[in-house]
């Protein structure tokens, strides 16, 4: 993942799937994640939509409809991100946080990211 984050805040590790509708990213944590850590990982994962070689700085500007469906109990997750809206440098994404088998949904929500030009 080509993002400017550094350890231990870099949660998005591997881009697993990319298509026009959604992306899937494997995310890893050094401790059991909190809900804010999960939506930060989703924001980092949204960078998977960019195919540019140079990392760009993005700002998480809003979160809404965020729901913790199950308490985190592992350190690795699959985050599925769908692009809802793109308006210039601002994008709105929906996200789902799953276990590695994609059987359990840990969290859902909507986030808005602004990319620095």
Image: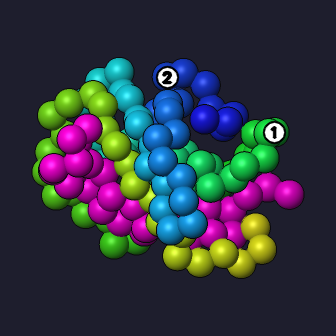
Q: Quadrant of residue 61?
A: bottom right
**Is 35 placed above or below 53 here?**
below
- Callout count: 2
Q: Is residue 103 magenta?
A: yes
Q: Quadrant of residue 73?
A: top left
Q: Quadrant of the C terminus?
A: bottom right
Q: Is residue 23 left or right of residue 59?
A: left
Dot 2: element? loop
Q: Which residues are magenta?
A: 90-117
Q: Which mark is residue 95?
A: none
Q: Is residue 102 magenta?
A: yes
Is disc 1 surrounded by few (<14), some (14 to 19) or many (20+) residues within 10 Å? few
**Is 91 placed above or below 36 here?**
below
**Rendered location of residue 111, percent (x, y):** 49, 65
Dot 1: element? loop
- Near-viewer residue (45 or 15): 15
**Rendered location of residue 69, percent (x, y):** 16, 58
**Is 68 placed above or below 83 here?**
above
Please, what is the dominant secondary structure of the magenta stretch?
Answer: strand
**Is 46 placed above or below 28 here?**
below
Q: Which mark is residue 8?
A: 2
Q: Is residue 37 visible?
A: yes
- Give the foreground label among 2 and 1: 1
Q: Which residue appears at 79% of the width and 39% of the height?
A: 53
């Amino acid at each position: 993942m080509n993002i400017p984050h550094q350890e231990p805040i870099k949660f998005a590790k591997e881009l697993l799937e990319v298509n026009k509708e959604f992306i899937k990213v494997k995310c890893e944590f050094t401790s059991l994640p909190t809900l804010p850590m999960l939506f930060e990982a989703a924001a980092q994962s949204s960078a998977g939509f960019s195919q540019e070689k140079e990392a760009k700085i993005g700002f998480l500007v809003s979160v809404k409809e965020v729901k913790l469906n199950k308490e985190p109990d592992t350190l690795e997750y699959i985050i599925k991100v769908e692009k809802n809206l793109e308006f210039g440098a601002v994008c709105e994404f929906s996200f789902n946080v799953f276990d590695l088998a994609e059987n359990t949904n840990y969290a859902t929500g909507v986030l808005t990211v602004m990319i620095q030009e």
